[in-house]
Amino acid sequence: MILPMISHLQTLFKEALHRAYPNSPSAAEMEVTPSTQDKFGHYQFNSAMKLAKALGEPPRTIAEKIVAALERGDTIEKTEIAGPGFINIFLKNEICIINIRN
């Protein structure tokens, strides 16, 4: 279930980017990846650094605005901004259980 979840999260983050920055460039370079360590959540969004030049703002500011515009719905429990603009994504327990079962 990793690929469908990544696709779903990428859609949520693209929508959040466009809410935070209505005139933003294409979100094609945005990516969500599985976390490398449990302490960073289930997934990570590391594209704020890539977007910084195009948007003319520091990556952490971009990450903060994306998180503020993010609709967590029934998927995301919480997000944490780390370092210069990494967004750690923690899924709701129910979603993890469903993914394990499937």
Image (spheres, rainbow, N blue to C red):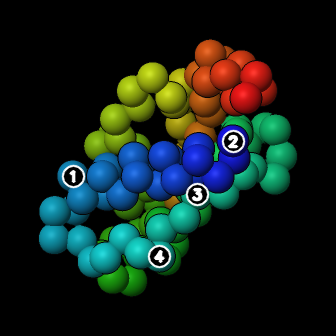
Q: Position of residue 87 (x, y in %)?
A: 56, 50
Query: Residue under circle 2?
Result: 1
Q: Give yes or no for contact between labels 4 and 3 (Cβ–Cβ under 8 Å).
A: no
Question: What residue lies at 21% left-to-right and 52% top-to-bottom?
Answer: 19
In the rendered view, does 37 fall on the left or right side of 60?
right
Nearer mark to the viewer, of 1 and 2: 2
In the rendered view, does 54 fall on the left or right side of 82?
left
In the rendered view, does 18 fall on the left or right side of 44?
left
What distance separates the C-alpha of mark 2 from that of mark 4?
22 Å
In the image, residue 10 sits, relative to residue 5, either above or below, namely below
Kindly identify the amino acid type of the residue bearing the numbered disc 3: Val
The numbered disc on residue 19 is 1
Kindly identify the amino acid type of the residue bearing the numbered disc 1: Arg
The quarter of the rendered structure image containing the N terminus is: top right
What distance separates the C-alpha of mark 1 from that of mark 2?
27 Å
Query: Could you tell me which secondary element the residue under label 3 belongs to?
Result: strand
Kindly identify the amino acid type of the residue bearing the numbered disc 4: Glu
Q: Give yes or no for contact between labels 1 and 4 (Cβ–Cβ under 8 Å).
A: no
Query: Could you tell me which secondary element the residue under label 1 belongs to?
Result: helix
Kindly identify the amino acid type of the residue bearing the numbered disc 2: Met
Query: Residue under circle 4?
Result: 29
Question: What residue lies at 29% left-to-right and 43% top-to-bottom?
Answer: 69
In the picture as drawn, the residue positioned furthest to the front comes out as 102
In-front residue for pair 66/7? 7
Query: Could you tell me which secondary element the residue under label 4 belongs to?
Result: helix
The numbered disc on residue 32 is 3
